[in-house]
Amino acid sequence: MPVLSADGISLVVDVAGPRLPRIRHFGADPGPLDADLLDVLVPLAGDLPLLPSAADAWFGRPGLSGHRQGVSMPVRWTLEEPVTLEPGDGATSGRLLASGIDAEAGLRVVSELELDRFGVLRMRHALTNLGPLPFTVDGLICLLPIPSGDAEVLDFSGRWAKEKQPQRAALDLGVWSREGRRGRTGHNGTGLLVVGETGFGFRHGALHAVHTAWSGDSLHYAERLPEGQSVLGGGELLSSGEIQLGEGESYVTPWVYFVASGDGLDTASARLHSHVRAHSPRTRTARPVTLNNWEATYFDHGLDRLLGLATLAADVGAERFVLDDGWFRGRRHDRAGLGDWYVDEGVWPHGLHPLADHVRSLGMEFGLWLEPEMVNPDSDLARTHPDWILGEAGRWPAEERFQQTLDVANPDAFGYLLGRLDALIAEYQLTYVKWDHNRDIAEPVHSGILGVHRQTDAVYRLIDELRRRHAGLEIESCASGGARVDYGILARTDRVWTSDCNDALERQQIQRWTGLLVPPEMLGSHVGSPADHITGRKLSLAFRSGTALFGHMGIEWDITTAGDEEVAELTEWIALHKRLRPLLHGGTTVRIDHPDPSAYVHGVVAPGRDHAVFAYVQLAARPAKAPPAFRLAGLDPSRDYQVSVIGPETAVAGAILPRWVEKPFTAAGSVLTEVGLPAPGLRPASLLLVEIAAARAASD
């Protein structure tokens, strides 16, 4: 019985046949198990074939649903050949390939399961039609059995500027389903769907989680049957008739990721972060501090103003300058110009070269905003090629944000975009592109068929080809903020714009929960204006900077309007970020289950546990006059650590501070993790940064 094991996690698969392999266990490594012992320890309710159907006496959501010209029959899969188990190659602990066939149904499936060295399992299926009549795929999902004790579900919803809002519920009998139908991941996309023991938290409780690595319509679900079986699954959400396979044609599902933890969300998150880091070479280089000009200048592209902004950005320590929306033809507001990807000669008579050259002369990289998948009806492109609009022929979909969607799967539209973007990247030597996607996709009809699948696949191919042509090009996935955050887009981009909301108080929660899936170095996190442009809330520079510190830090503020003291303080915060950057972007993220609901405690601990930084964040007024002590986590209990408060003095202005804040001191790791530190008396919307460094022995 094959067992794939890595980092304390095991996948146990029964491949005896003659049916498709059955998943016997996914979770904590149980150690050596023979078949007889496994039968005793794992009840039948935890034993599930890879693609269950009614033919397996499975009465839950079927693994495959579809039909031939309206006729649907349960599929009886049998192994076509022995299961292949490939040994690990360093990046993985092993890979399992199983080929099943139902000759009478005229279908073949090849299932691929891969467990990486961090204990992250990913799965996908490839379905091939062997029959002469077309086969319509209505659904093909990846699922795993989960323990019946997993009785609470955590998922996430949200909206524009308020992404990743957590919601918990009991997982009762039936289906808990999250279906995304917006043509992109969506502001309300769950990212992770987690099922675990009742009351699981960041540092305690057994759980399992699923993520569908797909940027189009998607499905995440958990299901409990009265017979005692429970499953967790995900896949692409297909519209009727979207995937029709002719004879010999195949459909391959997106990768679906599964992760397990016996001690809370942080362990599952750390596994996922390690997986992403191992697959993204950009995360192994320093992430440049980025100034984006959007909230600084909007559509005002006066050259002198932008040159001054760039000069001051370099002075405070920025390493990249990104010119946002408004540089292309007819783009003086958001109602025109999208699709006309030519520099506006009236605004930029010498092209973007004066700005780009100035930025590079200051030692910064130059980047540019684009929104290739969208088009304004008021544009030369839409007037010349109305047939390139994604929608039913002769009838455009409902307009949103003054935009329609460009049919990227149309070969002519694809060719136009590739040619224009390729030329812009080459002419301006772009090292960075902010790739936006500002509306949900309505009526996505391509060639008479609903086409979210084709649209998403075409966008992937477009990005992949641009990156092939321009080695070193970095791309940010922005979708009116965090509406396209998934492992499908992150497989070909370098960071996500976490939210359009730069309000640091809102960002504390948005970044906390988006960060379950995405490592901090890939979370765009900028210091916004003193009064936020969306919420209007006024926050201190210390709170705004201390919040941005823990992501891919940047600036989204017209710093030319800042006073000298503000400029000096921002410079100090950026310098602190750069000093801590190897830790922040290479360590393990820690979130504390703090008993005070008015405060967050989070941090990052270095792999060797010799260095850490934590933030105590006061979100709102405390419910009690004396707040409870806060315990740190992730440290080595047997080590001594020096504890220091860091950051500009303004970070704790007006606070009532305990004695330990006054000067650095040394304490055992066991004291910090078990006893903790007295909490500071901070005002709402303020934070305290604590640096932890392994103390040297006296002989050193």
Image (tube, grey):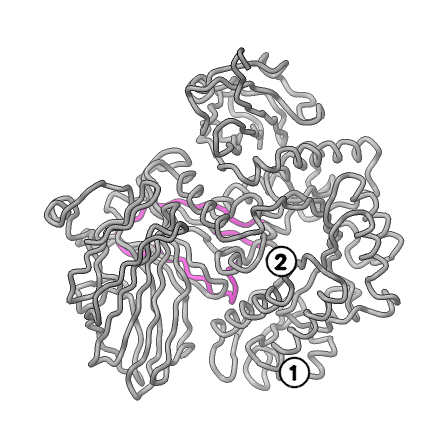
- Please give the residue where the numbered disc 1 appears in the rendered image: 386
Local SS, label 2: strand
Local SS, label 1: helix
Q: Kindly tell me whether residue 294 is visible in this rendering.
A: no
- Please give the residue where the numbered disc 2 appears in the rendered image: 475
Q: How many marks?
A: 2
Nearer to me, 63 or 537: 63
Q: Is residue 118 left or right of residue 628?
A: left
| Residue 143 locus on image (x, y percent) | 31, 58
Q: Is residue 546 left or right of residue 560?
A: left
Q: Kindly tell me whether residue 462 is visible in this rendering.
A: yes
Give the residue displayed 69% in from the left and 35% down from the top.
539
Q: Is residue 284 above or below residue 625?
A: below
Nearer to me, 122 or 639: 639
**The C terminus appears in which quarter of the rendering?**
top right
Instruction: Give the magenta part as a residue range.
Output: 157-186
Q: Is residue 516 left or right of residue 643?
A: left
- Which three-letter amino acid code belongs to the residue tagged 2? Ile
